[in-house]
Amino acid sequence: MRALATCAGLVGLWWALQHGFGVPPYLLPSPPAVLRALWTQRGVLSAGALATLAETLLGLALGAAFGMAAALLMALSAELRRWLLPVLLLSQAVPVFALAPLLVLWLGFGIASKAAMAAAVIFFPVTAAFHDGLRRVPQGMLDLAHSMGAAPWRVLLLVRVPAALPLLGAGLRVAACWAPMGAVIGEWMGASSGLGYVMLNANARVRTDLVFAALLLLSLMTVALWWAMDRALRRLLYWDPA
């Protein structure tokens, strides 16, 4: 109910601004105009949403897999950590908009470049969260494992990874929110489908109502992904009270 009340208040403020200040519809369409665009352009919007969702899910899976693998490698080998960590930090100095044209050039205008963009956006948050969790294992648990003669890889898989799962879950929640943004940025650089493609075409034709409709669908998709990730993590990490 609080979420619905907040959304209703924001829509009311939006409507009041549009009508009270006489903002032209091509600058700020009214909520009914956006709803009409959602209905009249439902075919275009649904096809674009499905394309963006496919790119997002593929990018989310790739980014999470590579991020967890990088964190595990850095936790398993101090030498690898000294080599990989500076590279990961330097990679965050490159703006994501600078990567998108290169990925389109290398991987084409299809789903591959958009999924790669989404994976690139979420790779560092997942890696950083999981690596931080692997470093914060209580020392008593590690001492107990070492006293029982456990090999380093067994300590990693049976002690450090389970203890780090809550922080990994935090990184995955962030990734679920950022992955759609990465897919849309890739679509803005060059695409033949997706919500980002719909936004570009609508903006070129001054169809601001259609741009808002696509943004609304993108927001709903992001909220749904975060909710699904949160529900899944609550089931998987049932033993963690947080």
Image (cartoon, rainbow, N blue to C red):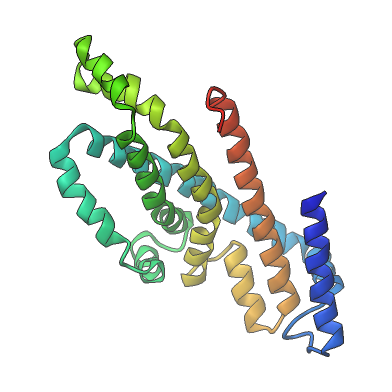
Relative to 80, 39 lies left or right: right
Relative to 218, 120 lies left or right: left
Q: Residue at x 21, y 48 (%)?
A: 84
Q: Which residue is drawn at 70% across and 59% down?
A: 217
Q: Residue at x 83, y 49 (%)?
A: 1
Relative to 224, 40 lies left or right: right
**Residue 44 can be seen in this image:** yes
Q: Count the numbered circles shown.
A: 0
Which residue is situated farthest in the front direction here? 140
Which residue is situated farthest in the top direction here? 148
Viewer-proximal residue among 156 and 120: 156
Which quadrant of the figure contains the C terminus?
A: top right
Q: Is 117 above or below relative to 41?
A: above
Question: Residue 220, position in %: x, y?
Answer: 69, 55
Question: Residue 172, position in %: x, y?
Answer: 49, 43
Q: Is 149 above or below relative to 124?
A: above
Q: Is 118 above or below relative to 61?
A: below
